[in-house]
Amino acid sequence: MEPLPSFTTYRAHMLLMTCLAILAVDFPIFPRSLVKCETYGVSLMDIGVGSFVFSGGIASAIPLIRTPSHLAAPTFPKMLRAMRKSLPIILLGLVRVLLVKGTEYPEHVSEYGVHWNFFITLALVPVMEVMLHPIMIRVSVTAIGVVVAISQQLLLSKFGLSDYVLNAPRVDLISANKEGIVSLPGYFSIHLLGLTTGLLLLPPSPSYFRRIQRSLQTHSLNDSALAERYAVRQNGKTATELSGYLVLWWALMGLCSLLKLDGGNGVSRRMVNISYIFWICAYNVSFILAYLLLDMVFFPSPSTTSRKKKNIDQNSASLHPIFPTAIPHPLLDAVNKNGLVVFLVANIATGLINLTIPTMYTSDLWAMVVLCGYSYAICTTAWVLRGVRLRL
């Protein structure tokens, strides 16, 4: 199936910006105002990790759309499969820890902790999602994500986890990795709210999954309901629902700031508080909606009315599958296809460059030369792998 151009463009741009930033930040030419904030505040690089998790949540909607009965399947076998799929990513995280410690590579333990890293977070959130599949049959995924976000903030504000992260000494394995552990529910909330976006963005109709939910509740899921996956896309309705979510997330973020529901200190990526969660959702939905609107202008899909007039057989291969027929840029499609692999290669290249040259003492001219060569290598890697899909 062809990918959805608006999602492909959004995700590829996010990946390329993230890959470029993780190396550029090590050079003096990179503005310090764009680096990750230590505890509170927002910057360009604070967007990266949250957006990565959010886009992963969108992509995790694909199996639920293709095989809705997967939601009602026994939970334990699904958890085992999810854990097996996540195992390579966990191993990558452990290898990264060993390499960082073994080479004395500079690191900021206040990001995730002494041993924890972003790969471990990425590996755990899909497993946590599977645990909630039985609830997702009866409860809105949006509601679940918001409840998790509120629970995360309550843990930070009312149960002392915020003070624990900021002030507790690192005396054991848990306290050594307090940032990674405490932020995990927040990233899980971002993943779930990304999943919500995927469930209305990727099917031909934004209400497709809600009808599937009702069918699963009444045990009346049949072929006619599943056939909607191959209907004509209703981008207008999708854009309208995305606009509603856009207003919701920005309003909730503003409300948290106005009423100081986040503790009064503002957005915190380090703890992934409720303001950070809603900020990431608002930011990403804004861009996805913008890309979708551009798709609607430059790649308009055939209307349902024109299809009916032509009396096209609803079972013919000419109908749209889950995704429309508009084709995104080939390079962006290549980056999106193996996004995690590209991100891994970027991390390895960043480490090798930092071990090879003194990046913090490199002139602006040579920094640009290195960054251009690095960007070219990342894009070349994605292009070479465009014909295969590597799963980690």
Image: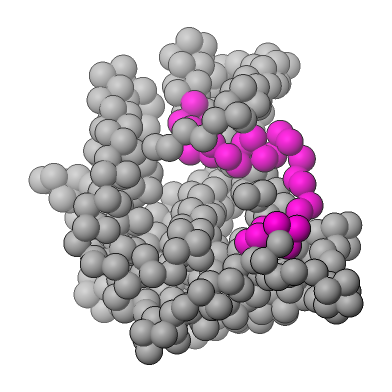
In the figure, is residue 228 to the left or right of 122? right
Residue at 31%, 17% in the rendered image: 103
The quarter of the rendered structure image containing the C terminus is: top left
Residue 31 horizontal/vertical position (percent): 65, 38
- For residue 258, which quarter of the picture? bottom right
Please say which color scheme the image uses.
one colour
In the figure, is residue 304 to the left or right of 243? right
- For residue 152, which quarter of the picture? bottom left
**In the rendered image, the vertical position of residue 356 relative to residue 10, given as above or below:** above
Q: How many marks?
A: 0
Residue 225 horizontal/vertical position (percent): 54, 78
Residue at 27%, 40% in the rendered image: 87
Does the stretch in magenta take in 258?
A: no
Which residue sits furthest bottom? 218
Residue 291 horizontal/vertical position (percent): 75, 58
**In the rendered image, the vertical position of residue 68 relative to residue 54, given as above or below:** below
Q: Is residue 83 visible?
A: yes
In the figure, is residue 65 to the left or right of 111? right
Q: Is residue 32 visible?
A: no
Residue at 58%, 26% in the rendered image: 385
Which residue sits furthest left? 172
Does the stretch in magenta take in 342?
A: yes
- For residue 274, which quarter of the picture? bottom left
Residue 78 horizontal/vertical position (percent): 27, 58
Region of the chain picked out in magenta, as a range: 317-345
Residue at 88%, 72% in the rendered image: 310
Which residue sits furthest top? 356
